[in-house]
Amino acid sequence: MQSIPVQSWTFEQESTIRIGRSTDNHVILYSAVVSRHHVEIRKVESGWEIVNLGANGTYLDGRRITQVPVDDGVIIRLARSGPNVQIHLTPQSAETSHSAMGEKTVGQNAKHPVSVASVGPTEIPEMDVDVVSPPAEVEAYVTTESQEEGTQPAKSSTASFLGTTVQADDAVNPAHVSHRFTLSACCHQFVDSGHLFCLECGKPLKPLGVVGDYQLVKVLEEDELSTVQLAWKDGKAVVLTTLLPNWAQLSEAVELFEQEARLFLAINHPALPRFLDVFSVAGQPYLVMEPVYGRSLRQVVTTESPLTQKVAIARILEVCAALDYLHAQTPPILHQRIKPEYLIQRSATTPLMVTGLTPGRLIAPLQASAEYAAPEQQQGQASFASDLYAIGPTLVFLLTGKSPAAFYAQREQGFRFYAEYVPGLTPDLAAVIRKLTNLQPTERFASGQELAEALQQIQNSSIEI
């Protein structure tokens, strides 16, 4: 059976095509499972490549990918249940698709998932990308723009749970999850209101199920090892992290998850979330954490403006302190996913919160967004230096609002992040970022404290105009 594309986009001069749910992408896909900035298609010397940026992953032939070359006619899937996107390397190969459903130009918004078409400078083949099937329908999902807290049922507020946005999909819940729960009489008037919780008693309105004493409310995030869900117990919202079912079947993985989760219970730092409990139901381990409410620094930069150097450095100094604290634990704790989405600004007067910390690193190194991850981490060898590496691209995004991917290039030192090509950076700050993103881990800063001292020196010598 031949798949018919939903829509098509054409680009003539672009060297990087961004696909995601945010309106600042070239191609906008309105789907709950698609991240705000999900995937990029980039021109390289040999042709084109696909780079995943989304929390829910990008899949090729059922396999989660990070960075792969483009073959003519290849089909990728955005998240496990998201839209299929087909890429063509010549305009002729998609000609039939365009005549069947018309062509969509950059800047037009689509009501349903779309297809991207024709990207190509003259020196390499042009490219066509078509979405050949829409994503699975999702009734509701947690957004980073507007979300109810749930802990105070009489009001709602802008909130970000862990800095990510993914689907509400009860298929990821373990088989032993119970679906027995009751609503109070007051809840029924709000069931179809779109709220997560009853505005009178605070109970969840449409629980996905029950685990122990917790009612599951929404899936917040899923990576290659675990799933993170918003839950409710005794009038209080919490966050539950557990292993995916395929990992939970392995006794060694469960043991390592519980071992690391118990380490998290001892964390006590103003810039890190508070972890509350570890428990197990039918062999499935769970870690309980307090939710973190606020806006991620990605949201702040995207919706308002890039940060000034003074503010950006001040925020990064808080990240340095949090990483030093984690690295000093016994055994040390690596974060592995530092990026703007996981840096939550609760208010102008409270410390930044570094979220995105989940157990599982003892089982296997976590995959991180390619534009923020150190090269050795992408090869499965994370270290203290890998956490510090991610601060470089993060700082550049905070200062410019541009994707760090724009500053990776094949130049005199091979393919790497070149801070000197970032517009507006002072020479001393560019030198710090270049050291942070050195290809050799031993050539980077030795600790968050050493980095903080270098940044503080820049801060002290700078004059705000």
Image (cartoon, rainbow, N blue to C red):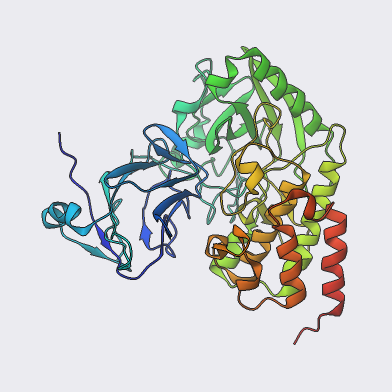
Q: Residue at x 58, y 34 (%)?
A: 229
Could you tell me if residue 38 is visible in this image? yes
Image: 61 above or below 15 = above
Residue 270 shows in this picture: no
- The quarter of the picture where residue 368 lies is top right
When the figure is inspected, residue 310 is found, relative to residue 74, above or below; the finding is below
- Residue at 76% of width from left, 23% of height from top? 259
Q: Is residue 246 left or right of residue 352?
A: left
Q: Position of residue 338 (x, y in %)?
A: 67, 50
* Residue 292: % across, % down: 68, 47
* Quadrant (top left/top right/bottom left/bottom right) for the C terminus: bottom right
Where residue 138 appears, as percent x and y from the top left, is: 38, 40
Residue at x 38% of width, y 63% of height: 26
Q: Residue at x 46, y 36 (%)?
A: 64
- Return the residue nearer the eye: 408 or 130: 408
In this view, 274 is above or below 428: above
Q: Point out the residue furthest to the bottom here.
A: 465
Which picture quadrant has residue 304? bottom right
Provide residue 277's location: percent of width, then percent of height: 75, 28
> Which residue is more in the foreground, 411 or 252?
411
Quadrant for the N terminus, please: top left
